[in-house]
Structures are given as C-alpha cells and as structure tokens.
Image: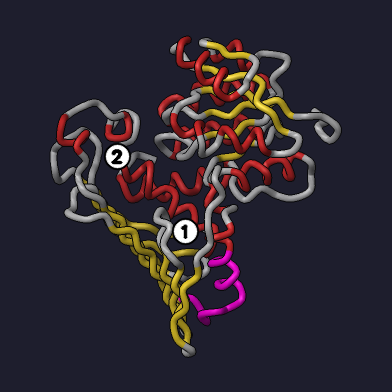
Amino acid sequence: MDIKDKTIRWGIIGCGNVTEIKSGPAYQKTEGFTIGAVMRRDEEKAADYAKRHGIAKYYTDADALINDPEIDAVYIATPPDVHKYYSLKVAEAGKPCCIEKPLAPNYKDCVTITEAFASKNIPLFVAYYRRTLPRFEQIREWINTNKIGTIRHLHWHLSKPTSAQDLSGEYNWRTDSKIATGGYFDDLASHGLDLFVHYFGIITNVSGISLNQQGLYTAKDAATACWLHESGITGSGCWNFGTLEREDKVEIFGSEGKIVFSVFENEPILLTTSEGTTAHEIAHPENIQLYHVQQMREHLLGRSQHPSTGATATHTNWVMDQIIGNEL
C-alpha cells in the first residue's frame, strides 16, 4: 500500500477506556491519520463512542471492520487474550496494525503474531508508548552520553495497595489468570521491562519467582526477579499488589552518578552526579500515546524506524514469561 500521498484511515477494535483520552484522540491529531471506524460488541457503546469522537462508522463485528475497503490499518485495543485472534485476521487482510500491550498473554502467541506480519512484510506496532515520550527519552539521552558514567545496575520497585474491586471479588480481566497469568504484573510491569530493554539492550538471562499471596483472584499478585542485559548491565525488580502504600521507583546506578524516576507517576526525574542532585520535570502530552502514533506515521512513510514493534514486544513477553513461569 502506497501511503505517501494519502490519509491513513484507521479502524479501532475495542473502543474502551484506553482509547478515550490516551490513544484514540492521538490518531485524530496526527497529520495524515484519521479514524474511519470503531468496533465494539455492545452496539450502544460503539455508537456512543463514534458519536462523541466524530467517527463516521461503527461496527459490532470485527471482521466487517477489518475487511472494510475504506479502512487502511487497524488498532487493536482489546484485552490481550484476543489479540492473536484479531491480529491474525488483520495480517490476512494485509493491513498495518498496532496492538495494545502486552502483545499477547504469552511469548508463544507473540511469536505467532509477529511471524504472521513479518511473512507478509506488513508493519506491526505495539503500544509501548513510553519508548517515545520526551520524559523517558531524556533519561535515555543521559545514559547514552554517559551522564552518570558507565551503567552498573538498575532496580525497580513497584507496589500498590489491594483495591476495593480486588477485595469485593468483582470480576476484573486484569486479574483473571486465563487472560493475564501475572495479573497486574502483566499490565504494569510490562511497561518498565520494555523500557529497560529500550535503554540497555535485550535481556539474555532472567530468573524470577512469582506467586499469589492474597488469594483474592486467580492471577499472580507478587513477583521478584533479577536479570542480565546483553550489555553486561544487571537488573532487579520486585512487584507486589497488596501493600499498604503505592510506590514506583526506578534507580539506575552508574560509576559516576545515579538516575531516579517513576515509570507511572508524574514525579520529577532526579539526576545525581558529583556536582549534586538536580530535579527535572518533563510533562506528558494530554494524549499520552501521541508521540507513539506520530512515529508510526513516520515509519509508514519510510522516514524512521519505530522503536516499538512486534519483534521488540515479543522479547518483552519472553522476559515476562521467564519471571511469571509461563511455559515457553
């Protein structure tokens, strides 16, 4: 498909919360992109979303959207257990695709998805949008320019209190082991682990322990791990979703300094060198996937390589499976 002189008409499968502000408007704000149709199984909700966002068409049938000749590319924003089902249909239709993270519930499905697009030379993107945000790219620049010397180790601690929904027993797909074996780990830890690979290269060795400590749902609720990047940098992390307080802290230790930041919170980035500690505040855009979506446009035009593809996301899933204990 030659897209250089045309507007790319995207179709969205699964127009839920993530598409309201985080992603959907980013497609509408990106030059050369528009949203041509949305799909949701609930017709009333699909129609409401289309009306509120000024989208001409809506469907309750994913096949109809995927095969619509007026849709050029597809964004899959559903829970991960159906990513493979829908994405293979998109690949068969020969259309570029962006899939929400994680790419799939396990590494094996990620390989299947990625190979389906690669075999046809069709672009496949995954919404690990932190790889494109100025806040995290500033950290990457400090790392690449040796601002804290040679990197030795990184550590991430992420924890949050048990939610009222968890305690109530109300269904939540994020804690259903059939959809997300690692529970909140799959949804949240994937962002940070993917970012660390972006910073330090692929992970060659990883060992983890995971379990369910609270017994409130079927998925895991606690994990700890250590790993080695191909660059020789070591890493460690712990994730727990039943603590008193929420904490999100990454520490990158170098031979001449340290960088401290949060993956999810809008806290200042702390840069420590021999000259002291400075705090840096870098705001996110209103639609947090904006730069991710804009860089997809640049990739499709052949101007640059997008940093988050099926291949990079598949590696992130491999790391997660090693920690959670999914069969490879």
Magenta-span inclusion, residue 148: yes
In the drawing, does residue 264 fall left or right of residue 34?
left
Q: Tell me the number on the disc at residue 142.
A: none
Residue neighbourhood size for the residue with mark 1, other residues' Cα within 10 Å, grouped as few (<14), some (14–19), many (≥20): many
Name the image quarter holding the N terminus: top right
Which mark is nearer the camera, 1 or 2?
Answer: 2
Q: Earlier in the sequence, mark 1 or mark 2?
A: 2
Q: Residue at x 62, y 48 (%)?
A: 291
Task: Give me the residue at 29% from left, 58% from top.
Answer: 247
Residue to which mark 1 is pinned: 203
x%, y% of residue 277?
44, 81
Report whether 213 appears left or right of 28. Answer: left
On screen, 151 above or below 106?
below
Residue sitting nearer the eye, 34 or 90: 34
Using the image, determine if residue 315 lies above or below residue 113: below
**Residue 86 falls inside the magenta stretch:** no
Q: Secondary structure at mark 2?
A: loop
Rendered image quadrant of residue 28: top right
**Which residue type does callout 1 highlight?**
Ile
**Which residue is pictured at 33% across the width and 50% down the height?**
323
Numbered range of the magenta stretch: 138-151
Residue 324: give x, y in percent of width and height: 31, 46
Circle on res. 183: 2
Q: Is residue 292 visible?
A: yes
In the rendered image, is residue 222 in sight? Answer: no
Amino acid type of disc 2?
Gly
Element on which disc 1 rests: strand
Please tell me which residue lies in front, 1 or 120: 1
